[in-house]
Amino acid sequence: MKKKMTALREVLSDFRSDYSLCGKCKLCQAVHVQEVDYGRFWRNCPSGTRFRFEAYYASGKLEMARALDLQEIEPTPAMQHALYTCMLCGSCQEQCYPVKQIFPMRVFELLREQAVRDGWGPPEEHAQAVANLEETDNLLGRPQAERGAWAEGLDLKDASKEKVEALLFAGCHYSFKPELQEAARSAARVLKAAGLDLGILGSEELCCGAPLLELGDRDFFETFGLENIKRFEASGAETLISLCPHCSWVFAEEYGPEMEIKPKHAVQVVAGAIKKKQITPAREVKMKVAWHDPCRLGRRLGFYDQPRRILSSIPGLEVVELPRNRHNSLCCGNGGMAGYAFPEFGEWTAKERVFEAEFVEADALVTSCPWCEEMLRRGAEARGSKVRVENVFSLLEKSL
């Protein structure tokens, strides 16, 4: 019998009580309004706010799941669009669970898995991403031989050939996109400054599989997962440090129970190093910045304080909060593979987030997710905004 990463796999019907109990109270459409001072920023569901039909809010998709489960309806292109424009940001679950103990985002993830099994998902707009992963083992369709080129000159160990204590996992975006590679290089230099025995897999690093899981193709995701686990453990590393929150999410939730190596996001490691005085920022960086909480790093993994701790350690940096921050954060526009398939919708969401940075008069939005960096820059350009988008490790390196 073929090994599975998840011995007991959840299916949509396991959450029948969740999608049957939705009372259409509309809480899923907003933030915790008592925590956000300005009504202008109360809406927080990107697809519902943009398309303005019930089906695009959590309440509508829960009803969709209920009706499909009871075979009251058949899938349609409109249902597919409503399901795959969801950014899986988790804002609806943030509102719903404390009140009714309903897990809408988990329902939508399993509804996508059901759509893949039944043949009506993912949409055609995602076909190139799946083809790239099938043909090249990375999301961008680039030659795997080039995957480690971003780290040239950094004196990082080749973890496929020698033992390392900490294995750095760059991910597809940081490995291949020139506009993001310098942020990855900064992160590696900062981690080395903390004294870590650091290595990478280079061309032996594969996609983490997160895009496939977000699309609902769990079987294909697990082929990546099982192979990655073998390669991670062969390195002999004790810690797996990822730069992308999407990688961190699948390593923690999906890979974690199956491997001995301990997964962490780089902000955890660096915030800890600053606390232990292994890194001491000294040079002033005079700038007013606002931290953008990536959905996977914040709501999914709960890392809210660590990046703020890094920013507050940099002399001269003025840190302000966006109106929607921490568990109220607005998605960048690139979550759930929605921005990949529907770029205009992703850009529309990013422009709203950039406006929020302008509202608090920040010079820059700072984050540590390649999907966020990419989409927020597009939003700033589309708005003609003066707000820059910075990576937290690039800022920190300026101060070391």
Image: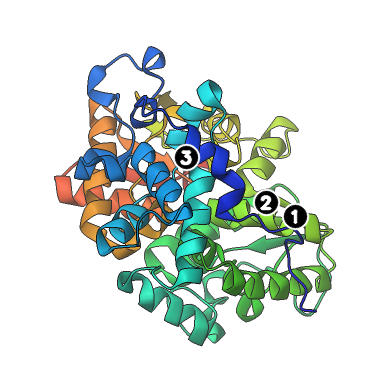
What x and y, as percent, mark residue 207? 57, 71
Helix, strand or loop at mark 1: helix
C-beta proximity under 8 Å, tags 1 and 3: no
C-alpha span from label 3 to label 2 = 15 Å
Q: Which residue is mark 3?
A: 90
Label whose residue precedes the other's in the sequence (1 or 3): 3
C-alpha span from label 1 to label 3 = 21 Å
Mark 2: which amino acid? Glu
What x and y, as percent, mark residue 173? 46, 65
Mark 3: which amino acid? Gly
Residue situated in front as seen by the camera: 116 or 184: 116
Few, some or many residues within 10 Å of mark 2 (<14, 14–19, 20+) = few
Q: Which mark is residue 256?
A: 1
Q: Please report the residue visible at 45 percent of the width from the left and 64 percent of the height from the top.
A: 115
Q: Please report the residue visible at 57 percent of the width from the left and 51 percent of the height from the top.
A: 13
The quadrant in which the C terminus is found is top right
What x and y, as percent, mark residue 123? 34, 69
C-beta proximity under 8 Å, tags 3 and 2: no
Q: Which residue is mark 2?
A: 253
C-alpha span from label 2 to label 1 = 6 Å
What x and y, as percent, mark residue 372? 40, 50
Q: Is residue 145 visible?
A: yes
Q: Which mark is residue 290?
A: none
Left/right placement of residue 332 relative to residue 327 reads: left
Left/right placement of residue 346 relative to residue 289 reads: left
Few, some or many residues within 10 Å of mark 1 (<14, 14–19, 20+) = some
C-beta proximity under 8 Å, tags 2 and 1: yes
